[in-house]
Image: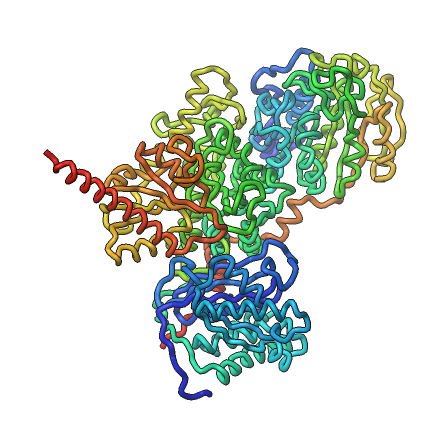
Amino acid sequence: MAKNKKVIPLKEHIIEFVSDSGEGAQKAANSFAKTCGMMGNGLWTIEVIPAEIQPPPHTTSSTSGNRIRLAEGKVTNAGDLAQTVVAFNEMAFLSRVQAGAVADDVLLIIDNIWATHDDPAYRESYKKITGDVKSRGGTVIEVPFEEETAKIVEDSKRGKNMFVLGYMGYLYQRDLNILRQIVEEMFAKKSKTVIQNNIALLEGGYTYAEEHLDFRYEIPSVPSKVPMVVMNGNTAIALGAIAAGFELCSMYPITPATSASHALSDIMEGLGGMVHQAEDEIAAIGVAIGSNYAGKPALTITSGPGMALKTEFQGLAVMTETPLVIVDVQRGGPSTGLPTKIEQGDLLSSLFGAPGDAPKVVIAPSTIKDCFSVMIMARKIAEEFRMLVIVLTDANLATGQQIFKRPEFSEVSLPPPIDLSPVPEGTNPFDWDPKTGLSRRLIPGQPGGMCVTTTLNHNAQGKVTHDAASNQRGHEMRSRKLAALQHTLKAPEVYGPKTGDLLIVGWGSTRGTIDEAVDRARAEGYEVSAVNLLFLSPLQPGLKKIFSGFKKVMTIELNYSDNWGDPLITEENRRYSQLAFLLRSHTLMDVDCWSRVPGRPFMPMEIHEVIVREIKKIKGAKEETAKLVSKAGGLK
Amino acid sequence: MTVLSMEEFLEKECGDHNYELEDYEAEVPRWCKGCGDHGVLTSVQKLLRDRKINPEDVICVSGIGCSSRFPHYLKTYGFHGIHGRALTLSEGVALARPDLHLLTVMGDGDCFSIGGNHWIHALRYNFNATVIVLDNEIYGLTKKQASPTTRQGVVTNTTPKGAYLKSLNPLTLMLGVTNISFLAQTATWLPGHLDNTLNKAWDHKGLSFVRILQRCPAYLSSSFEATGPDFPAVFLEGEGGIAVDKGMLQKASVIQHDHHNLLEAQKVALTETPSPMGLIYYDPNVPTYGDIRRRRIKTLDRPGLIAGLNAELDKYTVKQQHG
C-alpha cells in the first residue's frame, strides 16, 4: 500500500491527542507539536487536563491530552473544532465531543482493543461511540495500538503513546529524523534501552501507518529566517522574570500558576536567584515585599484564590509604595471553582481587591510572547513608580504552546545595581513630586536615610499622621502616579478600520481568537474591528475617541455576565462582564458585552456568530427605523 | 605611653563609630505610662550603642499592635507591617540582605494568634533575626480582648465571664518545632536580665526567639501578680547561658539547666509557675535558611546572567530545518 497514496493538501488542521490520565497522550502530542515547530509550521497547543491526579480510568473525567492547531502560517489561537482526534479509548474521545470540541466530520483514530475487550460495558460503549461518529458523518480508523505496541515492548500500556506519535507523524508527513531526535531528547536522562525502545515504537507506529493508510495529509511549512522558540506562557513568564532581573520568586503552590515557579525552580539558582516556597500565600507575598523593601527585586506568582489571600499585603505594598510584581494566572472562580480551567474573572478583584483606595497597575499580556516582555515592563514600572503591578494571564496562556520569534534582551532590561550611597540626614522617604506623586526610594543600609516605612497613613517624612489634610495628600500622591503613568501610554491600536458597525473590545488571551473572528466576518463584508487592551489600570488614552467610530461597542470576555433576555434581567439590574463594567464607567458610553464561562478558550466561530448576530441587529434596527419612517410618510 | 601602629590608629579614629543613646532615638514613644515596651526599647537602644552598630545597618520589622510601634521609636530603618505578618516580611529582608541586622518585634496576639502559621514556619526556616515577642497576655491596641496567652478566667471585653480556655504555652509549642535554635524568656521587671538576654540573642546566628513578659498597665494591671516583681520566676543557669546578675538573686531562685538538651528544655518550658527565665534552648549549629539557600546560588555578573538566560532560551529554540 506504500505506493499511490492520496495526498490531501491542507492549509491547517486541528488535531487532538487524548488518553486516560497517565497514558502519555500529552507527551506524544508535545513531541508532535515540537516537530511541527522545527519544521517551520505555525502552531498553537492547548492542554486538556483532568482536574484530579488519578481519576477513574476509562471515564470521561480521566481525559488528558493536547489540542494542536497546526498551520502553514501564523496561528494565534486554538481554533474551532477538532478535525482529527487520536484517542486511546472511546471515553476520552466522548469527553471531547461532550465539550463541544469535535467536528461532525472528524477523523477519529482509535485503539480498537476495546471492541473485543472482556468487559461487555467497554465493548458496548466503544460500538456506540464509534457508531455515532459515523452516523454524524465522521470517519473512524481503528488501529490496534496496544496490540502492536505489545509486539515491540513488554509493557504495552507505557509505550503506546510513542507508537501513536509515529502513526500521526506518518499521517501528517512529519520528518521522521526530527521525530527521532525529539524522542531521544525527551528520554535523554533515561537508560539506553529506554531510548531504543521508544525509538522502536516511534518507527513501529510510522511503519504501521505507512502500511495501512491509503492517504496522507500535507501541510506545507515555511521555515523562519529568524530564530524561533516554542514554549508555553508560564515558561515565558519565568524566563521573562529572569530577563527582568528578579532575584527571588516567592510563591505557594496553586494551579495553574505553579508551573511558572517550577520553571524558575529549575533554573533560578544557576542564574543568581532563588524560588522560595513559602508556608502559605500570605507569607509568599510578605517575603516578596520584605525582599523588595530591602532592595532585592522579588515577585510572587499565584492564581485567584491566592490573590484573595494576598489582598491585605497588596494594600501594604500600595501604602508603603514598595515596588512589587504579582503574576495572577487566572482560573475559573469563585472559590476553588474550576482550578485547571481558563477564566478572565480576576480583573475587578485585582483592581479593587484591597481595602480602601489602593491604586495599582494592572496589565494583561495577550500572547505567550507578551508574557515574556511584559515581565520586564512590569518590574520597571513597579520600581520607577514605586507601585504594585499585577500581571493577569490565564490558564490558556499558561499551558498553551506557541511558536514565536526568539525574544531579545540585554542588560538594559535588568535593574540598576542597588545604590547604598549616603543621603543627607532627614531625607524624606516619600519626597513626593507634587505633580506626579513620584519619589525616590530609600534602601536600608543607606547612611542618613533611617526612616520608618509604615502601614499607617503617613506624611512625606514617613511619620504617622491622622489628620485630614495629610490623609488626603497621601491618597492623592499614590493615585497621581497612575495618572503620571497613563500620560506615558499610547492609545491602543485598532485591528481593522477605525470606523464601522461594531467594535469588539477584549483583553488578555482572547486576542487571537477575536482577531480571527473579525477577519472572517470582514471577509464576509461585515464592518467590524477589534481592540485589545494591554493596560487595564491605568486604561490607555483615547478609548472614547476610538469607541465613537463605531455604531456599537461590546466586550467579549471569558467571565460571567447576565444575558439580555434572561429571567428578571433588566437594564437596571444586568451585571456586565468585568471589562465592560470598567469601560462603561470610564467612558460613560453604552458598552455592551458578550461573555461566557465555558472553562475553555473561545473558538473563533463562536465569536464570529456573535459578530454576525450583533451586526444584523444593528442593520435590522436601521431597516426597522427606515420602514417606520416610510410608513409614516417619510421625514418631513 | 602606648604607640599605636598605623592600622590601630586608623581603627581607633576611623573604624567603629561611637554612638550615644540619642543616636538610636526617633520619636518620643507614645506607649502608656508604665508599659513594659519602654524598657525593651531602652534595652535595645543600649545594645546598639554598646555594640557600636551603625543605625543604617539595622532593620526593625513589626506587625500590628502596641508593641509593633517599636520601629517608630527606634532611629534605624524600620518596617511597620500588617497584623501577624512581621515574620514573613522579616524573612524577605533576611533573604535579601544578610549584611544587615534584623530585629523583629511582635505582640502576643500578633505572633501567637493571627501570625501562628508564620511563627511555626519561621522557627523551622531559622532565618537570621532577633525576634522578640512583648507578651502582656492581652490585646491592647484594640482594647482588652483575650489573647492566646490570656490566663483562664481573666475577664476581658470578649470574655466578660472570664477567659474560657487555659492559656497557650508558647514555649512548649516552639520546642516542638524542628530546627529551633534559640529560645529564651525574660521579663521587663528584670531589666538586667532583659539586657543580658537580648545580647545573647543578638549574638546568635539563626532565629533567636525571646519572649518578654510584661504588664499592660491599662488593660491588665492585675497580671503577673499585679507588679511583676512578685511574679514567681526561676532563673536558668547553665554554661554559656544568660548571666544572672547578683542583684537579681533576691527576686527568684536559680536552677541549673542544660540549654543544649531539648528534652530538658521541654521539661523546663512546661512549668509555667514559677516561670523559667533565661536561655531555655540553644543550638548554635542549626544552619540558617539563608545560608542553606545562598550556598547553591551561583554568583553571576550582568553579562553572565544574560549569557545564562540565553543558554536557557536555547533549549526552547527550534532549529528549523530549511529546504
Judge whether A179 appears above or below B243 on screen.
below
Q: Is residue B258 visible?
A: yes
* Image quadrant occupied by the N terminus of chain B: top right
Q: Quadrant of residue B3?
A: top right
Instruction: Report the front residue among A535 and A48.
Output: A48
Q: Is residue A165 above or below residue A497?
A: below
Q: How is the image coloured?
A: rainbow
> x, y (%) of residue B253?
89, 22
Residue appearing at x 60%, y 64% in the figure:
A20
The one nearer the camera, B199 or A483, is: A483
Q: Is residue A242 among what the camera can see?
A: no
Name the residue at 36% across, 30% down: A436
Left or right of A579? Residue B143 is right
Q: Is residue A47 left or right of residue A538?
A: right
Residue closest to the eye, A519 or B22: A519
Which residue is situated farthest in the left direction here?
A636
Q: Position of residue A23 (x, y in %)?
A: 61, 67
x, y (%) of residue A197? 61, 78
Q: Quadrant of residue A229?
A: bottom left
Asked if A127 appears above or below A442 in the picture, the reply is below
Q: How many marks?
A: 0
Compared across the picture, whether B226 is left or right of A212 comes to: right
- Position of residue B74 measured from the top left corner of the image (x, y, whole percent): 60, 23
Residue under the point 46% across and 20% down: A471
Foreground of the two, B220 or A27 = A27
**Quadrant where the C terminus of chain B lies?**
bottom left
